[in-house]
Image (cartoon, helix red, strand yellow):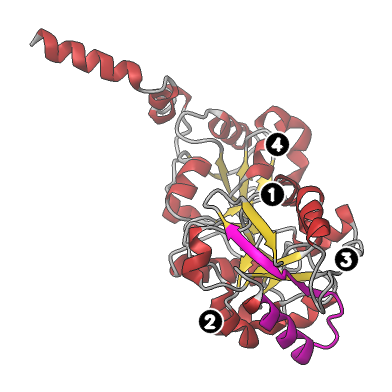
Amino acid sequence: MACLFTAFVMALMLIPAGAFAEETPIPAEMQFHAIVDTAFVQQYVKVPKPADVMIIDSRPANKFGEGYIPTAVSIPDSQFDKMVSQLPANKNALLVFYCGGLHCPLSHKSAKKAEALGYKNVKVYAEGIPGWKKAGNAAGISIDVIAAMMNNGDTYLLVDARPTKKFLEGSIPSAISLPDSKFMEKLAVLPAGKDVPLIFFCGGYACPLSHKSADKAALLGYTKIMIAEAGYPAWKEQFGAAAAVAVKAGTQEGSVDIAWFEKMMKENPSGIMLVDVRDAAEYAQGHMKNAVNIPVDALEKNIASLPADKPVVFVCATGSRSGEAYYMVRDMRPEMKDVFYIEAETTYNPDGTYEIKVHK
């Protein structure tokens, strides 16, 4: 018996200190009296937003940008009194406050403040953003988060859900075009791995297309779905239109200079659209971090998804399939002037690293 007790104590010691705190609700006396669940919140996460409904994130503003319930507004509890003017004028409006989970008191504190101001329909979603994500729902993210992911070379697929015409007029660097109206027809542009982060965006907060596409992706089994609700308008305002990138060509027609390419991948990977045209199974075993997978056999029917306002570089294992993709685009999208491929032998590792050997 003593041995069993000792083993039990040792097991407890191996559990991270925060594991218990994260699961422990705040004391009952601190909780707001009207608690709602995920299903309740889901019915109000819509674009356009339902009238007289406001979902409010009570966490600090920096936490909000990292991931929030779509359509929510940020009113940190610490800034509640200063930002109270953002609340609806209608005191019968539904207000749903949330924060960082069951252990977080901020939403409860804000809800009590709102009720004290005379609001009659106040709720707290106590499970907060952790519960929202755990239920498989998409999280909203800020434009700054996308920029950071680009700079870090993170693996993700950025999807422009607007019509192709809008995409061709300008889009966020590294995005592909997958119009919501063509979603089911163009599934081949989505990654085979269901755990690849997908970020959908469209024309701003009033645009429902990214939300619709995110819902469809969830039904397909993708598990890491995000929505950049501010969309391309916010990107363009904050970062400007994509700057032109001068590509250094290689010695063979359509090829890219390997030294230039490797320098670009280190210093400005978002400056080019990198398309891996190998089969999905090959891509899943290892690929360049910012590459999207469109197998060469599926490229023709998805060729409209490629941007015309930034360089596109095709990669494969030997240069054969990427070269085929290059000539296909030249024939079918002659307006795309900056199209290239890697004429070399490339090996890919599961961690996103790779090695390029120029053919002799």
Q: Where is residue 260 in the image (x, y as percent from the top left)?
A: 83, 58
Q: What residue span does the magenta drawing correspond to?
A: 322-347
The disc at residue 153 is 1
Residue 61 relative to residue 97: left or right: right
Q: Earlier in the sequence, mark 3 or mark 4?
A: 4
- Please name the residue that numbered disc 2 is placed on: 184
| Gap between marks 3 and 1 measured at Cα | 20 Å
- Please name the residue that numbered disc 4 is placed on: 62
Residue furthest to the top = 2
Choose top left, top right, bottom left or bottom right for residue 169: bottom right
Residue 140 relative to residue 240: left or right: left
Q: 267 or 169: which is nearer to us?
A: 267
Residue 72 relative to residue 191: left or right: right
Q: Which of marks 4 and 2 is nearer the N terminus?
A: 4
Q: Earlier in the sequence, mark 3 or mark 2?
A: 2
Q: What element carries label 4?
A: helix
- Please name the residue that numbered disc 3 is placed on: 247
Q: 73 or 234: which is nearer to us?
A: 234
- CB under 8 Å between discs 4 and 1: no
Q: Is 154 placed above or below 359 here?
A: above
Residue drawn at (61%, 50%), measured in percent from left and top? 353
Residue drawn at (72%, 71%), measured in percent from left and top? 343
Q: Earlier in the sequence, mark 4 or mark 1?
A: 4
Foreground: disc 3 or disc 4: 3
Amino acid type of the residue tagged 1 in the rendering: Gly
Q: Which of marks 1 and 2 is nearer the N terminus?
A: 1
Residue furthest to the front = 360
